[in-house]
Amino acid sequence: MPTLVAEDLDHEEFNEMRSPAPAEVERRVIKPGEIANKNFALVFGTFQLFFIICYGVGAKYDDNTDPAVDDLHATGGAEMSRYTMWQDIHVMVFVGFGFLMTFLRSYGFSSLTQNFLVGIFSIQWGILTTGFMAGAFDGGVEKIPLHLTQMVEGDFAAACALISLGAILGKSTPIQTLVMVFFELFFYAFNYQIGVTKLGAADIGGTIFLHTFGAYFGLAVSFAINHLTHMAIPLARRRMNEHLFEELDTNGDGVLTLEEVQAGADKLGMTVQEATEMFFRLDDNGDGVITPTELVQGHKENASNYHSDMFAMIGTLFLWIFWPSFVSVLADNNAQNRCVIHTVFALSSSCLMACCTSNYFRPHHKFNMVDVQNATLAGGVTIGAVADHHLGGNGALIIGSMAGMLSSVGYIFIMPFLEDAIGLYDTCGVHNLHGMPGVLGGVLSIITSSMVKSSTYGDNAGDVFGKMSGDGGRSAGKQALAQFGGLMITLIIAISSGLLTGWVICQPNWFEPPPEMFND
């Protein structure tokens, strides 16, 4: 019988048959990000325990919910009338936002999962922060009342957090994201109370205090991540332009090696370590050199494909259908009717004008899916600040048209400019869908509130603008100043707190960055 020797087998067969020596010890290699993934369970579990304690000691049933209240039907019926609209908002938060973020071709699982986690985290924490701030600004901190309207506030807080998530999607770990949301919702509730309670600004659909705040908070966090961790591919592209590429290519072979990039760190305005990190970010295929193509295309996984764009359209359609409930859920009496009508008109016109703008400016005069998925919704963002005002159907159509065109122009022209000019990278384009349309809505609220007359509102102006009620109520001009103040304070608090939060979650001693961007 012939003797079987190692040369008769291939490498894999030989290793399978070979028995390990007694002294051999199997060593498992810890992959990048594995420690951070393991710590997520500890961090999230700690947060959940914290929420349980807070609800145990700091929340209670109100009269709409307490079984000890005798007149249950009289107190609970009005609250339950909001239930169907609250369910619509729930669908928007978990299905609409979730699937809208699946456009990244290699990040769909992570997008849906992070959306789900941020949503449930934000509802719990948002109820606590908004309830606590409301009590604090009302003159005393009491137990937070639990009722259906407070649940709506929780969903609004979740929507704000998910808007911010869109700006950093694919560039943060789940731990970094949840810590961001933890700080954000505290500032969100604080800003809301300053704008609504103290200034008396009106914003029935959350245009100023939800969409605008969430967008610019998230953009500030994204800006910090891009610059503090040197993850911004657009920033690298801006610094390493075509002329500088040729200057760094000292041997003239048409590609850049690590040594050439390190030698030219001063020309890039970077340290050697920063230039090294940038090199490996740009070297997408890992062949040890940067080609002009890699420089131009940025990160290879920051892109969509046919199927991921189809999934994202599911989110767009759900958001478009249910948006009137989002805007009108907290409105009362006939103001709710106006909110629904105006939102439907604004969404319709923004959809049409966004497609027209996309068709006119995009190459070959074809629709671009980014515009169709996002800019078509901009009318719902803008109309929220003025949805209960006296606009008329034509006014709502004009506002929606302006929002759709502005959002499309943002995706086509403004977004690439900001990437190259200041290294502001916005994964989902929240500046174009929520930021600029939100500011537009705030400006329009200044205009419409300054035009309030008894001929259009009768004696009911106070139902829309709370501080204008009664004989001693403020004038239309003062209400316009309150709207202006609310918008400006929102921008200041959102950007400053976002930069601070971004700095916190980028500290290398506290948080581990994702091992790879835009990839599950």
Image: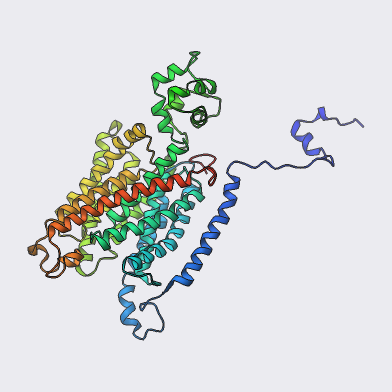
Which quadrant of the structure image shows residue 421?
A: top left
Colour scheme in use: rainbow
**Residue at the outermost top position:** 251
**Residue at the outermost bottom position:** 70
x and y, in percent, of residue 493 in the image:
33, 51
Name which residue lies at 18% across and 53% down: 446
**10 in relation to 309, above or below:** above
Quadrant into which the N terminus falls: top right
**131 in relation to 282, above or below:** below
x and y, in percent, of residue 116 in the image:
46, 56
> Does residue 379 appear to the left or right of 451 in the view shown?
right
Name which residue lies at 33% across and 37% down: 415
Name which residue lies at 36% across and 79% down: 63
Name which residue lies at 13% across and 68% down: 472
Question: In this orientation, does residue 391 appear?
Answer: no
> Does residue 359 appear to the left or right of 63 in the view shown?
left
Q: Nearer the viewer, residue 323 or 386?
A: 386
Question: In this orientation, does residue 120 appear?
Answer: yes
x and y, in percent, of residue 322 in the image:
32, 58
Which quadrant of the structure image shows residue 448?
A: bottom left
The total of numbered circles placed on residues is 0
Q: Nearer the viewer, residue 4 or 41?
A: 41
x and y, in percent, of residue 304 in the image:
43, 39
**Residue at the outermost front position:** 139
Which quadrant of the structure image shows residue 244?
A: top left
> Does residue 113 appear to the left or right of 193 in the view shown?
right
